[in-house]
């Protein structure tokens, strides 16, 4: 039950942030990292699709597994960009680290729910 709550929370969170990113409201952040503007669209699109996947994954574990892996990888890249490329303080990367861990945890949990493995 707790995993479902986290799936819903992540689904809502990434829908909001994905929409914010794709709208261009975070374009300054992406340009600060030296990324081309297409990354605004790609990152926002991934977050929106995976946010829907988190909700759908409540009933279809494979969808939550794939969404969790993709969101986790996206957040892992965000951590790398914040700490290595932008050289931001560690505390600025903490939200991305937490989201990365939550996404990968949800993905790992789904493995036990897959019918082929039971």
Image: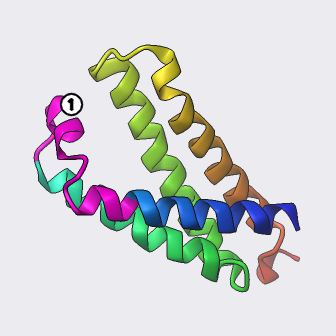
| Residue occupying image coordinates x 56% and y 28% | 94
Q: On the rendered structure, is 42 left or right of 31? A: right
| Residue occupying image coordinates x 19% and y 56% | 24
- 118 or 56: which is nearer to us? 56
Check disc 1 and report its element: helix, strand or loop. loop
Dividing the picture into quadrants, the one containing residue 4 is: bottom right
Q: Relative to 58, say whether 80 is above or below.
A: above
| Residue occupying image coordinates x 68% and y 65% | 7
What span is in magenta?
A: 18-36
- 83 or 107: which is nearer to us? 83
Residue underneath mark 1: 33
| Residue occupying image coordinates x 80% and y 83% | 115
Q: Within the magenta stretch, is there residue 37?
A: no
Residue 48, percent across and down?
A: 41, 69
Q: On the rendered structure, is 1 left or right of 26? A: right
Q: Relative to 49, say whether 105 is above or below.
A: above
Residue furthest to the left in view is: 36
Q: On the rendered structure, is 110 left or right of 92? A: right
Residue 86, percent across and down?
A: 28, 21
């Amino acid at each position: 039950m707790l995993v479902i709550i986290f799936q819903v929370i992540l689904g809502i969170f990434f829908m909001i942030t994905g929409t914010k990113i794709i709208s261009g409201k975070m374009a300054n952040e992406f340009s600060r990292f030296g990324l081309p503007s297409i990354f605004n669209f790609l990152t926002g699109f991934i977050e929106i699709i995976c946010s829907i996947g988190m909700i759908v994954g409540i009933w279809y574990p494979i969808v939550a597994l794939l969404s969790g892996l993709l969101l986790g990888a996206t957040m892992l890249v965000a951590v790398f960009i914040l700490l290595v490329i932008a050289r931001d303080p560690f505390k600025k990367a903490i939200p991305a680290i937490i989201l990365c861990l939550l996404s990968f945890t949800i993905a790992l949990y789904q493995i036990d729910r897959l019918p082929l493995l039971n």
